[in-house]
Amino acid sequence: MPLRHAIEHHARQRPDALAVSISGKALDYATLFQKLRRLHGALVSLPHRHRGELSLPSNARLFAVSTGNHSAAATLLPAALATPHAVMLLDPQWPAALQQRMLAKLPPDVVFCLSTQTALIEAAERLSIPAITVDTDAFETFLAAPADLPLTNPRDTFMVGFTSGTTSEPKAFARARHSWRASLDASRLAFALTEQSHTFSPGPLAHGISLYALAETLELGAAFHTIERFDLADAHRAMETTRRIVAVPSLLSALCHGASQEQVVEITTAGAKLDPSLLTKARDFFPRARIHEYYGASELGFVSLNTHGRSSSSAPANSVGRPFPHVELSIRENGAEVAQGNPGTIFVRGDLAIEGYLWGGRNSGFRREGPWATVGDLGKLNYDGSLTLLGREGGMVITAGHNVYPQEIESALTEIPGITGALVLGRTHHSRGQELVALLQGDVPLEEIRSQLAIRLPRYKLPRRFFRLADWPLTSSGKPDRTMLLNWLEEKDVRLVPLHPAT
């Protein structure tokens, strides 16, 4: 059912049940529903800006949120899901200048932010946009008398998101309500969710995986937990009353410390491939949990799913699983489908994808070919029906005349016992065009790495140089920062330790 009806239903049937808790600051369903009605009353009183880029009814406003995981997000984000209004998700980790450019490109009707974000507040004032600081009394003062929540149109926009894709300037996209309604129906079954699926998601609410987990949990009538900033002790306290975790692999790895968590029975992870060493660690730390690893994109929604049990997986563990329910896959090149087992660009067909970018992405990222859509990821469909990722268009390395996909080498490296993380980069080389460089975590001798890789890969796919490092630099979404690592290579940064043969 639409989330507006679900939240009202839970507020009437179980008013005292916990809806959202952010670092212990809690809202029950009755309080959440009342706050949504008060926020709706305040938003509709704002002047209406005409914006043809979005599908919004006359009683809807576009509001920007740059609050991170502040407790006010427990009201602001569900408002976009359950009222006619749409949210513009500004990442508080962005540089101030980038936030200001996004604000100027698509001016919202109001900005919700923190009092410390002075540059954003000043930019909003220059654009005549009200800026409401949620960490002061201004937010409570802004809320109006409760107003009835009207019905929402499935075709209307509820969210403006941003994705950097393969460029540094974020691309904006609008997502319609019907796409997440279809997604919620599919993921409820795929992830075996019930009203007892109390969920902990430690990541930033400005990112899709955590925001979607919030929507899933509220629709069920379960409790959603998160924390303002990552702290292991706070995370373990939040996990005490939850049965489910939703996190990118880097955060899932960070949670796997201390005593095992027997109460967690479901884990959902996405955003990067789950390497074998982390899968083993998660199975040990959460011994009762099934681990649902899905591949998807902000623009596409769910694409494929691999569910890992205690000792087996629903698809080969080095794949990203088989097509998600109601999604068709096609590996295509130059407008035609390639033979099974051959590499190409991954296209999907279903009702979960966006229509296109609001700006940016003309030469990269999301595009359509008839009913098929892609974000430019490369892969191959295996003969058992599973999908293997090979990288991103433009990320292929050409070395000595051979086309090489780094992710294939990374998968082979993480299969070697003792290697806990691997990244492969292509670095400019004077005679080979590019040379393959492997960055590793784990204490395995170079001779052992090379001999193991020689069993798994042809000679031309073997990295020529190997470096060890303690920790990856991460992007704001929790993925390894490949651009920074390339800079470290060029600068001979001491955090990259060259591996040499034993003497």
Image (cartoon, helix red, strand yellow):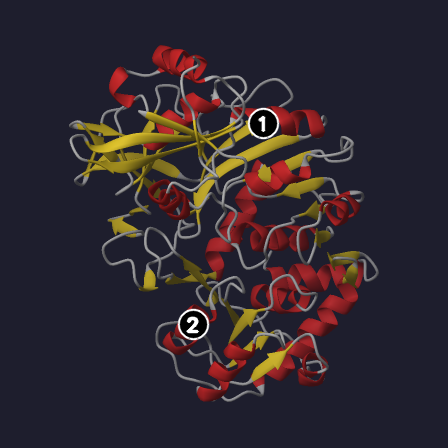
- Circle on res. 279: 1
Classify mark 2: helix, strand or loop.
helix
Tell me where residue 363 appears, x and y as whole percent: 23, 55
Q: Nearer the viewer, residue 21 or 134?
A: 134
Q: Which of 46 and 113 is in front in this view?
A: 113
User: In the rendered image, is residue 387 in sight?
Assistant: no
Residue lying at 54% horizontally and 39% vertically, measured from the top left: 471
Q: In this view, does 471 lie to the left or right of 157?
A: right
> Mark 1 or mark 2: which comes first in sequence?
2
Classify mark 1: helix, strand or loop.
helix
User: In the rendered image, is residue 305 in sight?
Assistant: yes
Q: Name the amino acid type tagged 1.
A: Leu
Q: Nearer the viewer, residue 347 or 272?
A: 272
Residue lying at 58% horizontally and 27% vertically, measured from the top left: 279
Tell me where residue 165 appears, x and y as whole percent: 36, 52
Q: Name the amino acid type tagged 2.
A: Ala
* Residue 454 to residue 404: above or below: above
Residue lying at 50% horizontally and 37% vertically, measured from the top left: 294
Tell me where residue 155 appears, x and y as whole percent: 44, 64
Quadrant of residue 485 within the rendered picture = top left
Between the C-alphas of marks 1 and 2, the distance is 39 Å
Q: Name the residue under label 2.
A: 97
Residue lying at 58% horizontally and 70% vertically, measured from the top left: 83
Q: Mark 1 or mark 2: which is in front?
A: 2
* Residue 118 to residue 456: above or below: below
Tell me where residue 268 appears, x and y as whole percent: 59, 39
